[in-house]
Amino acid sequence: MFQINTVMGAVKPLVSEITHYLSRLNTEQQKAVLTVVKTFAAGQQDWWDEISQEQQQAIDKASAEMKAGKLTPQDEVMKKYTKWLKK
């Protein structure tokens, strides 16, 4: 479903304004606006559904490792591999 992220309730005034202007349009204009809104909403698919099963499993595994504290801080990685980064 199409969702709008809000910051401090900013959506209510926006929805009110949209509703205000929609009520001023005739039926054909409202249908045109609805078509545009549906087009935007269709483009808001979750990227998770767009990636492969293997990619989802890899992300789930990495997330579980992160939650378990099995991470190496970047500064430690950089110390270890600096010699390969220099040209």
Image (cartoon, rainbow, N blue to C red):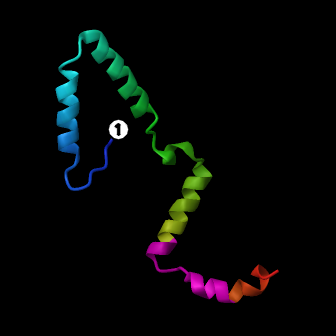
| Residue 42 picture quarter | top left
The magenta segment is 65-79
**Quadrant, the N terminus:** top left
Q: Secondary structure at mark 1?
A: loop
Instruction: Decide if residue 22 is on the left or right side of residue 57.
Output: left
38 or 49: nearer the eye? 38
On the image, the x and y values in percent for residue 39 come to: 43, 27
- The residue pinned by badge 1 equals 2
Instruction: Decide if residue 4 is on the left or right side of residue 23.
Output: right
Instruction: Decide if residue 87 is on the left or right side of residue 15.
Output: right
> In the rendered structure, does residue 58 fall within the stretch colored magenta?
no
Residue at left 61%, top 53%?
54
On the image, the x and y values in percent for residue 65 come to: 51, 73
In the picture as drawn, the residue positioned furthest to the right comes out as 87
57 or 84: nearer the eye? 84
Q: Is residue 20 positioned above or below 56 on the image?
A: above
| Residue 23 picture quarter | top left
On the image, the x and y values in percent for residue 41 come to: 39, 33
Residue at left 19%, top 34%?
17
**Quadrant, the C terminus:** bottom right
> In the rendered structure, does residue 69 fall within the stretch colored magenta?
yes
| Amino acid type of the residue that numbered disc 1 sits on in the rendered structure | Phe
Residue at left 72%, top 85%?
82
